[in-house]
Amino acid sequence: MKTRIRELRAKTGITQEELAQLVGVRRETIVFLEKGKYNPSLKLAYRVARTLGSTIEEVFIFEEEDLA
């Protein structure tokens, strides 16, 4: 899964650490999300999207192979 977290964080001026604190996870979790190495729970995806002023669909890009 790909994400636009880094891009949206840059637009809003939020650091990885700040985003992590706002959504209740460690900074490392945000790093893994940005690199596509971690698939978030629906609850975390919602929190990240909401914090970045976006929808889940705008933040997380699901590719066909991810759905198999």
Image: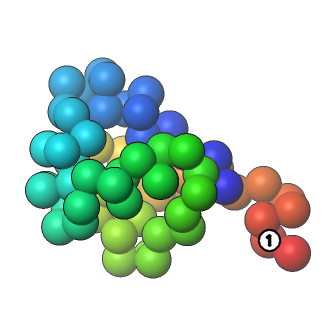
22 lies above or below 40 = above
The C terminus: image quadrant: bottom right
Instruction: Specify few, some or many for label 1: CA neighbours under 10 Å numbering under 14, 14-19, or 20 or more.
Output: few
Residue denoted by label 1: 67
Number of on-image labels: 1
The x, y position of residue 35, in whole percent, is 55, 45
The residue that appears at 86% across and 62% down in the rendered structure is 65
Q: Amino acid at mark 1?
A: Leu
Mark 1 secondary-structure assignment: helix
Rendered image quadrant of residue 11? top left
Visible residue check, residue 34: yes
35 left or right of 45 in image: right
Visible residue check, residue 58: no
The residue that appears at 35% across and 77% down in the rendered structure is 43
The way the protein has been coloured in the rendering is rainbow
Residue closer to the observer: 50 or 17? 17
The residue that appears at 54% across and 63% down in the rendered structure is 38
Residue closer to the observer: 62 or 26? 26
Rendered image quadrant of residue 10? top left
8 left or right of 25 in image: right
The N terminus: image quadrant: bottom right
58 left or right of 11 in image: right
The x, y position of residue 36, in whole percent, is 59, 51
Residue closer to the observer: 7 or 31? 31
The x, y position of residue 64, in whole percent, is 85, 59
In the image as oriented, which residue stretches furthest toward the front?
28
The residue that appears at 21% across and 34% down in the rendered structure is 15
The x, y position of residue 12, in whole percent, is 23, 27
